[in-house]
Image (tube, helix red, strand yellow):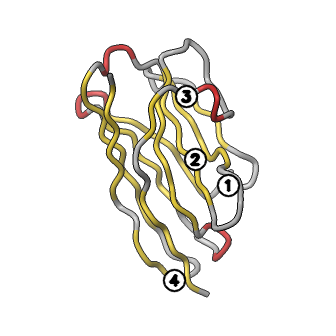
Amino acid sequence: QVQLVESGGGLVQAGGSLRLSCAASGRTFSIYAMGWFRQAPGKEREFVAAITRSGLTTYSADSVKGRITISRDNAKNTVYLQMNSLKPEDTAVYYCAATIKTSLYSSRIGYDYWGQGTQVTVSS
């Protein structure tokens, strides 16, 4: 089993920045890639970004490219989501996910483990 714990969410003004963290524990050696998703009220959970274990391959949604960067620190078993130039439409609960499948997925079905989520609210 793998446990994921997100942190770093909060309230920020439009144009501001936040860095989310996701700490993994348990059978972390089995993780191939980790990703971030978000879910706004009344909307489907959507893909934000993902990164492979090596950190050499990343993939992000077109809606956040240029504003959001995913990175990882394997020594800490932690993945980060740096979010800049935040907009009110970025308001959502952000979820961390991990997959043991050997591919980089942008679909929820590709992930095996999920965190509880952290709220990000961007005020206008």
Earlier in the chain: of badge 1 and badge 2, it is: 2
Q: Which mark is residue 13?
A: 4
Earlier in the chain: of badge 4 and badge 1, it is: 4
Give the image location of residue 16, x and y in percent. Answer: 50, 75
Residue hosting label 3: 111
Q: Which tag is nearer the camera, tag 4 or tag 3? A: 3
| Residue at the limit of the structure toward the right, as seen here | 62
Q: Which tag is nearer the camera, tag 1 or tag 2? A: 2
Report the amino acid beneath label 4. Answer: Gln
Secondary structure beneath disc 1?
loop
Asked whether the beta carbons under mark 2 and mark 4 sit within 8 Å of each other, the answer is: no
Earlier in the chain: of badge 2 and badge 4, it is: 4
Report the amino acid beneath label 3. Answer: Tyr
Give the image location of residue 121, x and y in percent. Answer: 51, 74
Looking at the rendered image, the quarter that the N terminus falls into is: top left
Give the image location of residue 83, x and y in percent. Answer: 52, 60
10 Å crowding of disc 2: few (<14), some (14-19), many (20+)? many
